Amino acid sequence: MTVAYAVPRPVSRWRNPSALPGFGISMGFVLFYLSAIVLIPLAALAIRPWELGWSGFVAVITQPRTLAAFELSFGASAIAALLNTVFGFVVAWSLVRYRFPLKGLVDALVDLPFALPTAVAGIALSTLYAPNGWLGAPLAALGVKAAYTPLGVVIALTFIGLPFVVRTLQPVLSELGKEAEEASATLGASRGQTFRRVILPALAPAIVTGAALSFARAVGEYGSVIFIAGNLPMRSEIAPLLIVIKLEQFDYAGAAAIGLTMLAASFLILLALNLLQSALFAKR
Amino acid sequence: MLKRICLSLTAATLLAGVAHAADVTLLNVSYDPTRELYKAENAAFAAQWKAKTGDTVTINQSHGGSGAQSRAVIDGLDADVVTLALAYDIDAIAQKAQLLPANWQGRLPEHSTPYTSTVVFLVRKGNPWHIHDWPDLIKPGIQVITPNPKTSGGARWSYLAAWAYAERKPGGNPDKAKQFVADLYSHVPVLDSGARGSTTTFVNRGIGDVLLSWENEAYLALDQLGRDKFEIVYPSVSILAEPPVAILDKNVDRHGTRKVAEAYLQFLYSKEGQEIEAQNYYRPRDPQVAAEHAKQFPKLPLYTIDDVFGGWTKAQATHFADGGTFDQIYKPK
């Protein structure tokens, strides 16, 4: 009887060596799953607009009204993502670093925008920010119109995007330990230097991911925005609403053209952010 | 009353095996403001059908913006009957999904519209801005609330009512009408996607000085939100809004529900059905029922879509299709 010892097989360059078997089956599952859930529906979207031909496609997405909608959707999403990055960082920092009463409750509140049906969020926000609402009335007195303007769009998108930044940053922050900061301080760094040169670089990838997720969610958001946006063409009409309007006119190809353009733009932005993230990560 | 119907339905279900009565289910796909109307119609029809045939009929309702509902049916929502806000939305079903013949509108009396409605103004109590007729809507500082005609059937009727007023008034013509409608929409601060959304914006958010509304929706707002806060203003002229009904031949034949579906639509024209429509603030076709409720429905000159616009297909293409007159209003300055 011979004893067979496990000899490490040559590792293919396709996979990282792992003690656990099952590369074939897990890769197969990944391909099947991604195809069924992501790729096939998106392929259907990619096929549809070409019924219009190339010039028809370009005509749909370069109409002034469509361009205005793109500008609002991407612009407001970028502003919302930026706001969420700054204030989400503060929230995550406070939740990880400090102890205060009702911390568990505050922690749970962060997830509410995830759980709340978007239409409910939209109605709640528009009630609040309407000129006769609790926040809208004082704002109106200051001459600021919130609901039914592009500002309303930013408010809604900020609301729904917050948890993405906080939840991405939290685990990284708690991993970060205080030792590095203490070491930096004992070595003579100022507080600002410690923040900029020790904390921020370690957090950068998570910050970029959180901002990207918040942005991506905001670009596609429909339910909460339409209640607070005002929906005036050229002014406060978001691109997803334009898609719905096209669908209601049975203009499936036109709707798909706008959808595909948004998809491509979002994909490029996310890809760029991912590359930026790996660049930042590689430096360390 | 409702309880009694429920009880009798339950009893009927229990006895069904004994009596060999059938259980039938219909799906009525309708537009936004008809929830209350069809709840009442369905209960009454089910009771009548039960008495007549012994069969138990359950009618499910689906509501939403008329265009969205029409698209859902085209995409496969398995409706037996459709009761939508305007004929174009049923034309689209005939054209794109061939579920019913193109001449569907001639199959039932009165262009297949058992009840009609019109467009009225809802203003805040006391009418502080003295809004009495269409020209008052474009006075400086007035804010008008109406939904987006691209998505809302009611909004299309409102848009066309404004257009018809401006085109048909002495000295009016299509160019002036276009200018009037453009002026009107420059007074609109919010475009909701449906009639209910606009009512909410006007009533609950306190936005705007006047709401262009279905007559029935305006009365409903008064009933539910208080006659002490709002009042209805009838303009000098308006439009005859005809929300049509139709059975979807292919679907009812597949379900075996043609007989009951036809009886259901006929019921909407019956005295009992017309009475329920009048109670829900839809203008009944039956002259006798209409006379009984005359107080509730002031007489005013109403233009028809065929008169002024040459039918829905033409109106849709000229005004609401991509690049139509409505889109031209929102061209960049």
Image: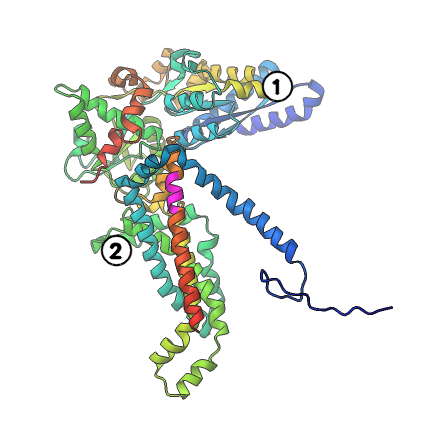
Return the residue nearer the eye: A278 or A190. A278
Outermost residue to the right: A1
Image position of B88 with respect to A86: above or below = above
Q: Secondary structure at mark 2?
A: helix
**Helix, strand or loop at disc 1?**
loop
Looking at the picture, which amino acid does disc 1 mark?
Asp
Q: Chain for mark 2?
A: A
When the figure is inspected, residue A179 is found, relative to residue B203, above or below; the finding is below
Q: Position of residue B267 (x, y in %)?
A: 48, 16
Residue at 23% x, 26% y is: B162
Judge the density around disc 1: few (<14), some (14-19), many (≥20) Cα neighbours within 10 Å: many
Judge the density around disc 2: few (<14), some (14-19), many (≥20) Cα neighbours within 10 Å: some
Image height check: is A193 above or below B1? below
Q: Which residue is mark 1?
A: B55
Task: Name the quadrant containing residue A92.
Answer: bottom left
Give the left or right position of residue B130, taking residue A65 as reference.
Answer: left
* B46 lies left or right of B113: right
Q: Nearer the viewer, residue B169 or B283?
A: B169
Up-down: is B296 above or below B202?
A: above
Image quarter where the C terminus of chain A lies is bottom left
**According to the image, label 2 marks what residue?**
A138
* Residue shown at the point (50%, 42%) measured from the top left: A41
**Range of magenta residues:** A257-262
In terms of secondary structure, what is the magenta stretch mainly? Answer: helix
Discs 2, 1 touching: Cβ within 8 Å = no
